């Protein structure tokens, strides 16, 4: 018997498939040149590069988060929960905003041939920021609020670059608006940044560690011979990720904390029994999961494991081991709450041989 | 109040004008579409095809989006039911016209470009125009826009207008020599566009392209 060997099934290091849309000028077009993709946005890029409005105060991530500012590896168990596709955040002080916005508006208005309805729309936009022109719940400003420079900021939209739906990512489309330092943003801006939004972003960026699920025997097992699965207490640390935003006169932060609560085993075939029958191994009193295999336990049924009932023939079964994490958040001013459980797992190929092949 | 136009009707009208006007045969672009011109030899609307005599629909928002007769942009799509999506779609077409108007006028500073774009949409328009200014190219032929779909964000003020572009009968023309550059037809002639149109709050129904995503070599558009 060779069952005492154990392997480690790593549930980490899943490479994120980053689809890069690279626009290169291609030669030899039948039709018009150059390429129509030149200068276009790419689906993986968020925000803007200075020609558009975006918030200058970046959100910073710390703790256990994906490197490079990308999406982490936590999958929400609640399919209806999604991180915010866009939000509003502090952008520029009054004087800086005036410089940027007035140049943009004047540049557009001075385009040769501007007039009619389009020209009127731009001139009303200018009046909105310069001449107190407001409407409904949106008040106008006098000279871009420069008298209040330093006492607040103009807020503007920010895209979540990890939002796959381009329309949702671009759905925060209100004009930049003023918020006094210490005041909450006007209520009609439902997407104005809050600790809860930051918590959702921390969740989205959170990187769960390579948690090692131990299996015995390793890749090859026998029909009717239980495979033991367990997690040592040592791997059961909490994981935290923090998202923070800091602008003059404005600071918010939120931290999400993930705690592993269970291990779910999926055999990859109907011809198998899981232990327990639900396939879900819950946490023990000592913070471990399952029970390590040791010599002499061969005839016992493991508290956490799988028994394959049929040979995999010439192929293999995909054994999926997933850890479920309980996730909650706390943030600025005592805010906090529960978040959907997260999961992170990986598959391993298992070969199951007929019982006859066991050496006696 | 703003008066909206019917882009399809306008495009067809423009196509008809162009084809009859170009009956002399100096331009082979659009050969396969000549049905429209065959039975209408008695009408001679060649003068009205000139931008200077631009009809009212060339200025849907008071800004001229008319193009020269041999630069034929066909928007082969149906107006969506939702009012905001129909308006966004109209102005997405105007945005494309604005880019080619800039190419024709040899400037990125044309009013049409400024009217129908902002932010990254403006940047895209300028990049596209600049590339053709640098290459000393204008364009001639028929560029077809089709398979259009629209979607609204929940607040209704952002609309995604997605469509295919077929440039297989749309060619670069050297400005200096007038030489039309034609290569072998290929998948590079097909692009899939997604334009995020955003309603300008101070404009009565003026939508601006704020983001442009282009997928080149789009097999789904063939």
Image: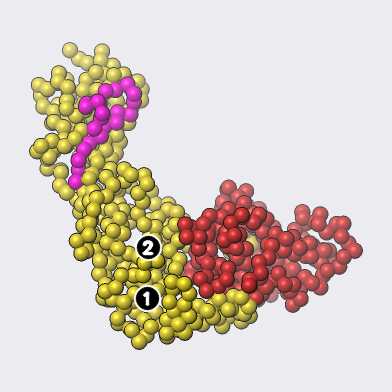
- Give the left or right position of residue B193, taking residue A144 as reference: right
| Chain that bears disc 2 | A
Which label is found at residue A178? 1
**How many marks can you see?**
2
Does label 2 or label 1 sit earlier along the sequence?
1
The residue depicted at 19 percent of the width and 61 percent of the height is A334
Is residue A360 one of those drawn in magenta?
Answer: no
Extreme residue in the front direction: A136
Identify the element where label 1 is drawn: strand
Position above or below: A354 against A128? above
- Residue holding disc 2: A191
Which label is found at residue A285? none
The residue depicted at 74 percent of the width and 72 percent of the height is B55
How many residues crowd mark 1 within 10 Å: few (<14), some (14–19), many (20+)? many
Is residue A261 one of those drawn in magenta?
Answer: yes
Magenta residues span A259-280
Q: Point out residue A67 in the picture as x, y percentages from the top left corner.
A: 28, 56
Q: Point out residue B159 in the picture as x, y percentages from the top left corner.
A: 52, 60
Colour red, chain: B
The residue depicted at 42 percent of the width and 84 percent of the height is A142
């Amino acid at each position: 018997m060779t069952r005492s060997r154990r392997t480690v099934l790593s549930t980490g290091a899943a490479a994120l498939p980053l689809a890069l849309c690279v626009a290169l000028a291609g030669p030899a077009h039948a039709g018009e040149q150059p390429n129509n993709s030149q200068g276009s946005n790419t689906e993986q890029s968020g925000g803007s590069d200075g020609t558009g409005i975006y918030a200058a105060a970046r959100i910073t991530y710390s703790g256990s988060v994906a490197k490079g500012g990308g999406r982490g590896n936590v999958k929400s168990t609640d399919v209806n929960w999604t991180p915010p596709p866009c939000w509003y955040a502090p952008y520029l002080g009054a004087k800086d905003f005036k410089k940027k916005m007035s140049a943009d508006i004047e540049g557009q208005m001075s385009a040769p041939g501007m007039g009619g309805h389009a020209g009127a729309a731009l001139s009303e936009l200018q009046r909105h920021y310069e001449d107190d022109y407001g409407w409904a719940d949106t008040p106008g400003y006098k000279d871009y609020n420069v008298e209040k420079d330093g006492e607040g900021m103009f807020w503007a939209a920010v895209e979540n670059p990890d939002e796959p739906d381009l329309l949702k990512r671009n759905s925060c489309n209100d004009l930049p608006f003023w918020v006094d330092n210490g005041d909450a943003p006007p209520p009609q801006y439902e997407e104005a940044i809050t600790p809860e939004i930051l918590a959702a972003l921390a969740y989205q960026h959170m990187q769960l560690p390579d948690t090692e699920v131990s299996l015995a025997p390793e890749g090859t097992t026998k029909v009717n011979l239980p495979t033991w699965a367990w997690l040592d207490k040592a791997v059961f640390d909490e994981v935290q990720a923090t998202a923070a935003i800091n602008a003059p006169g404005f600071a918010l932060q939120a931290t999400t904390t993930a705690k592993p609560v269970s291990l779910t085993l999926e055999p990859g075939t109907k011809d198998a029994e899981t232990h327990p029958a639900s396939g879900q191994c819950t946490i023990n009193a000592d913070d471990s999961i399952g029970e390590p295999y040791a010599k002499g336990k061969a005839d016992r049924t493991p508290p956490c494991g799988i028994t394959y009932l049929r040979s995999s023939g010439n192929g293999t079964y995909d054994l999926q081991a997933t850890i479920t994490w309980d996730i909650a958040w706390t943030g600025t001013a005592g805010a906090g709450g529960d978040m959907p459980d997260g999961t992170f797992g990986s598959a391993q190929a298992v070969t199951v041989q007929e019982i006859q092949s066991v050496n006696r | 109040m703003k008066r909206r136009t019917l882009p399809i009707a306008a495009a067809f009208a423009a196509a008809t004008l162009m084809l009859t006007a170009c009956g002399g045969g100096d331009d082979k672009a659009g050969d396969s579409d000549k049905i429209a011109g065959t039975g209408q030899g008695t009408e001679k609307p060649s003068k009205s095809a000139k931008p200077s005599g631009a009809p009212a629909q060339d200025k849907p928002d008071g800004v001229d989006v008319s193009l020269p007769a041999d630069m034929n942009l066909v928007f082969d799509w149906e107006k969506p039911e939702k009012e905001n999506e129909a308006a966004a779609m109209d102005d997405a077409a105007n945005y494309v016209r604005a880019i080619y108007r800039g190419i024709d006028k040899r400037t990125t500073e044309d009013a049409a470009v400024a009217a129908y774009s902002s932010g990254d949409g403006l940047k895209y328009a300028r990049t596209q125009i600049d590339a053709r200014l640098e290459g000393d190219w204008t364009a001639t032929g028929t560029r077809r826009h089709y398979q259009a779909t629209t979607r609204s964000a929940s607040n209704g003020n952002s609309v995604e207008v997605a469509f295919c572009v077929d440039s297989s009968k749309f060619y670069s023309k050297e400005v200096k020599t007038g030489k039309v550059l034609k290569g072998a037809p290929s998948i590079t002639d097909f692009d899939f566009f997604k334009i995020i149109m955003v309603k300008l709050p101070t404009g009565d129904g003026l939508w601006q392209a704020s983001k442009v995503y282009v997928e080149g070599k789009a097999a789904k558009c063939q």
